[in-house]
Amino acid sequence: MQVPYNWLKTYIDFPYSPFELSDKLTMAGLEVEELDYLGKGLENIIIGEIIEIKDHPNADKLKICRVDIKEKTLQMITGAPNIKMNIKVPIAEVGVTLPTGMKIEKTTIRGEVSEGMICSKDELGLQEKRASGIMVLSDQAKKGEKFIKYQGLNEYVYKLDLTPNYARCLGMIGVAREVKAMQDDDLSIKYPEIDINEKKDQKADQIAEIKIEDENLCPRYAGLIIKDVKIKPSPKWMQNRLRAAGIRPINNIVDITNYILMEYNQPLHAFDLNKIKDRKIIVRRAKEKESVITLDGVKRSLDEQTLVITDPHKIIAVAGVMGSENSEVTENTTDIFLEAAYFNPTNIRKTARKLALPSEASHRFERGIDIENVVTAGRRAAFLMQEYAEGQVVKGVIDNYPLTYQENIVKVEISKINRLLGISLDKDEIEDMLKRLEIETIKREANCLKFKVPSYRNDIEEDADIIEEVARIYGYNNIFSTIPRSNQVGKRTRIQKIEKKIKNVMNATGLDEIITFSLTGPDDYRNLNLPSDHRYMDWVSIKNPLNEAFGLLRTSLIPGLVEAMSTNAKRQIEELKYFEIGRVFFNQGKNERPLEKTKLSAGSMGSVQDRWDLDAPDFYYLKGVLEEFFKKLNIDKNVKYLNGSQPFYHTGRTADIFYEDEKIGTLGELKPEIIEQYDLKERSAVLEIDLTTIFKEVEIGDYLFEMLPKYPAVVRDLAVMLSEEIPMMEVLNLINSQGQEILKDTELFDIYQGEQIPKGKKSIAFKLLFQAKDRTLTDQEVNSVVNQIIEKLKNKYEAEIRKK
């Protein structure tokens, strides 16, 4: 919305400069995006009259002109083809700098002096395309007058960024009301003149008829008839105001309807009355596949959801959006049927979007206009057509108003206003503020007030809206910032504390956190070779997805993880270590909420650590991450790893992860074909853990710190041979369970299968670290624990002790 400063002042005599008003509007909620001065760079251009023209003696294509600028005459040289006697032209004297940056100097051209420049439109910055000649002004221009005054360019224009609840400010009068509300003194709005000399020999409803077939889509439709109009240019002042508001002048009739659009925020449409069959207007829904050629020359196909204006034979307009070619006003038009209506905002919005036909009219209708102001705006337009199109206004208004406006009464508690805003106002102060907004108090009660909301304020529906208006008038900048009072200090929940600890552990083990989309697509799962009956294919579909690639709620974090790894691998990142904690969603059937679970995923590519020389560095890196993860959460003694399988994991290089016999996750190396498809390095591995059980089992308390040990540690190596089928973690857990309080650390440092080891067996070696807090351990104490461990291994796994 563009608001010219001087045009606004015709409705209210406010005391603010253009820059002061800019700040005031913004603080009132009408954000000024930009403040432009239309005459920038043109302040020193004046109007001159050509009083003498003669040929240049030394140049065939140049002319020497004498230009009268009232106070003096100047000699100027031009080559413009449209130069002629007694025309008015814009003049730049010596010393003037044009908007293009050109500085005018006194020059000699082929022996003749030039004392300035006769300007063209492009030289004045009024058009981008190079002009074919100088700018010629109308005979009404006065020599010596400032060019910006004549052109209406001595104007500041506010570009307002209005939110939908400020739809009332899409008209000048609406903005004027806001300016009135800013001021403490009792300024009044100067409403436009409407003084119609009606043609009394006939009434409008005797000439034309209006029928509304769908009153829900058109609660009010009014029409006026203006006869014997003369199509010609609109007056200069109107053209200047329209240009300043960003609207191109066309002719007096079109310009008047646009002027009322900008003045009253009321779209109007002028039909050629003689092109309306039987002079009968019908407001109805379009028929399926019915079409119309709109004013832009495009044939548009309609449906039953589109509201149209028709006569008995044809469509003459798409309601609230654009007129039709078959009823437009042309230079031959003499009689006008002027439409002033209210259309359903939702229907107009949908129609404009569907037809890809946004317009100034639809922009206003879809936000809601003042249904009570329809006839007033129409009469104002008729008055202007009487004055500037020499039209005869037929007596009366055809006003079909089936759904009349119902007054909006809102009740507000005084204590609620003060509580929500953190201020202290009494009834009188609140009444005074709202009175400035033309919100009338109709009832005063002990602790509340009842207000009647003006019909143009369709954004006010409840007490919260009234409270917002009080805040605006009181001044947002006058409300002190306060911190909300609370008896409880905010803190993390138990689950949040566990998640934070998990993130710390994952970061400490070398992984970077990523966040991927919860929305995904079917291809992300098909790329992992999942069968149709896999649990991950039990999707929850989105009703209104952005596109197919974001049409599902994810059932696993792995597709997003692999995609993130792939994106970075394609950018020549050699080593990737990522993790994510996020929600996944499983379909629970129709009309049931999806089952939500929190999962942890991690991925590794390009790891160079492979201490076991098993050609699986990423797999064992992630396994080491998991061991540290479970250890830090103090649940490692109840975790075990068993051989597993998943369609996207390499056969034989997959582990299912169990906690107390409940499967909680998987770890595996991606299949070669998946690695190739995503451009990952070979041996890339991923894992996924369901954190539901972990959240139940992990205990979160205060951190405990131990003193550094004062006494020396004792280290013993233990090598045993046992069946290769026995999981390593199971053996490790057994050893740790026998360590009493003095076994501080157990480290696996060797696995061997080969010579001297029978088939089906494996040799594993551990480093055991013993230490006490209060004494130096004796060999006897250490040997006792080691022998106990050996005995348990023999009894449970038939292990044999290997000696060097």
Image (cartoon, helix red, strand yellow):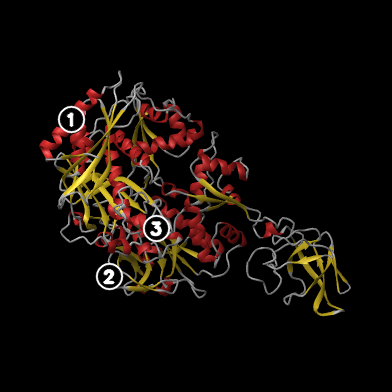
Q: Counting other residues with Cα less than 10 Å from the Cα at mark 1, is it few (<14), some (14-19), or many (20 or more)?
A: few
Q: Which residue, as the protein is rendered here, is positioned at the far top?
A: 774
Element type at mark 2: loop
Indicate the position of residue 559 as horizontal and vertical percent values.
Answer: 29, 55
Indicate the position of residue 56 as horizontal and vertical percent values.
Answer: 85, 77
| Front one among 326 and 78 | 78
- Kindly identify which numbered label has been placed on residue 475: none
Residue lying at 21% horizontally and 33% vertically, measured from the top left:
736
Element type at mark 3: helix
In the image, which is nearer the foreground, mark 2 or mark 3?
Answer: 3
> Mark 1 vs mark 3: which is more N-terminal?
3
Image height of 639 relative to 562, above or below? above
Q: For mark 2, what is the residue?
A: 287
Q: Amino acid at mark 3?
A: Ala
- Kindly identify which numbered label has been placed on residue 569: 3
Q: Amino acid at mark 2?
A: Lys
| Front one among 260 and 667 | 667
Do the residues bearing badges 2 and 3 touch, measured as CB atoms within 8 Å? no
Q: Is residue 287 left or right of residue 358?
A: left
Residue 400 can be seen, yes or no = no
The quarter of the displayed image where residue 281 is located? bottom left
| Front one among 96 and 153 | 96
Residue lying at 72% horizontally and 60% vertically, measured from the top left:
101
Q: For mark 1, what is the residue?
A: 787
